[in-house]
Amino acid sequence: MTAKAPPISLFLRELPYTAQIVASPFRRVKPLGQTRADGAPVLVFPGILSSDSSTSLLRRTFNAAGYHSYPSDMGFVTGITPAAFAKAEARLLHLHREERRKVALVGWSLGGLYARVLAQRLPECVSMVMTLGSPFSGSRRANNAWRLYEAINNHKVDAPDLPDDPSVKPPVHTVAVWSANDGVIAPECAKGAPDERDVEIEVPTKHFAFGAQRQSIDTIIRILDEQLPAAL
C-alpha cells in the first residue's frame, strides 16, 4: 500500500514543539550519567527552514554525553541544492581531516537526506548515519511538507538539483529512527525498506520533538551509544 501523509490532526499536534526548537540555543542541558571516553565525532544536520540553532540542544547534549558534536555550517536550509550540498561536503571533509577519524552523521528530517547522500559519496569519511524522521524512502509527497518545499524551491520535491537517490543505502552502518506519531512524515518513508537501511528503531515522539524534547534526545543518544560500536 502506498504511504500517505499523516493526517492534519497529527500535524497540528506538532506545532507546540516549534517553541522548543526556537529556544534550543538557550535551553540548559540536563546532567547525564555515564559518558563516552573516546569523544567520537558527530556532525549534525538540521531540517528544512532551520539552521544549526535548531540542533543546539541536541548537539550540546551529545557533547555532555562525551561526543564531539559539530554544527553543519550550512546556514539556513531551504531544500536540496548543489550549493548547500557543497557546504555539507566541505564540512565533512574538514572534520574528517581535523579529527583524523571517521565521523558519525546525524540528520533531522531533511537533514537526513544530506547525511545519507554524503555517506554514499564519501563513505571513507563516515562511521555511520542516523536519520531522525527523514523521508528518504518511498514517495516524496507522503508528507505534510512537500507543498511548502516546492513553494520555496525552483524544482519539484521529487526532482532536486542533485542526481543522488537518498533511498539507496550508503555503504556504512545506517540507522533509521522514526515515529508512528510523526505528524509531518509518513512513518513508512522514515522507516525505510530493509534494503535501504541496516536498522530501524521506533521512538515514541513527534517530528518536531526529535531534537527538541529532552526525553527524545536522551533516547537518540542511547541509540547512538548502542549502534556506533557496530559501525566501527
Image: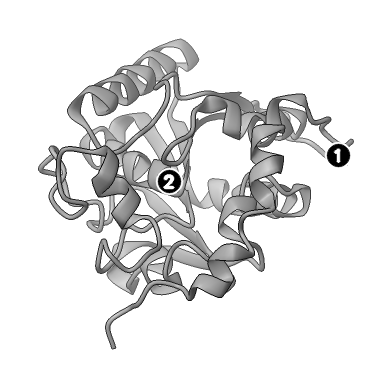
Q: Quick check: 54 left or right of 93?
A: right
- Estimate how packed mark 2 is, as few (under 14), some (14 to 19) or many (20 or more) residues with alpha carbons within 10 Å: many
Q: Considering depth in this image, is 216 or 123 the residue closer to the camera?
A: 216
Q: Residue at x 39, y 72 (%)?
A: 5
* Residue at image location 65% in from the left, 34% down from the top: 22
Q: Is residue 120 above or below residue 135?
A: above
Give the x, y percent position of residue 41.
55, 27
Residue 171 in sight here: no
Q: Residues within 10 Å of mark 1 (few under 14, many from 20)?
A: few
Q: Is residue 8 above or below residue 220?
A: below
Q: Which residue is mark 1?
A: 32
Q: In the displayed structure, would residue 197 be above or below residue 83?
A: below
Q: Position of residue 126 (x, y in %)?
A: 38, 35
The residue carrying mark 2 is 129
Q: Residue at x 32, y 69 (%)?
A: 142
The colour scheme used to paint the residues is one colour
Q: In the figure, residue 118 lies in which quadrant?
A: top left
Distance Cα–Cα, label 2 vs label 1:
23 Å
Image quadrant assignment for residue 189: bottom left
**Residue 122: in sight, yes or no?**
yes
Looking at the image, is mark 2 or mark 1 earlier in the sequence? 1
Amino acid at pointer 2: Val
Residue 59: % across, % down: 64, 31
Q: Amino acid at mark 1?
A: Leu
Instruction: Locate the N terminus and report the quarter of the image it occupies.
Output: bottom left
Cβ–Cβ below 8 Å for labels 2 and 1? no
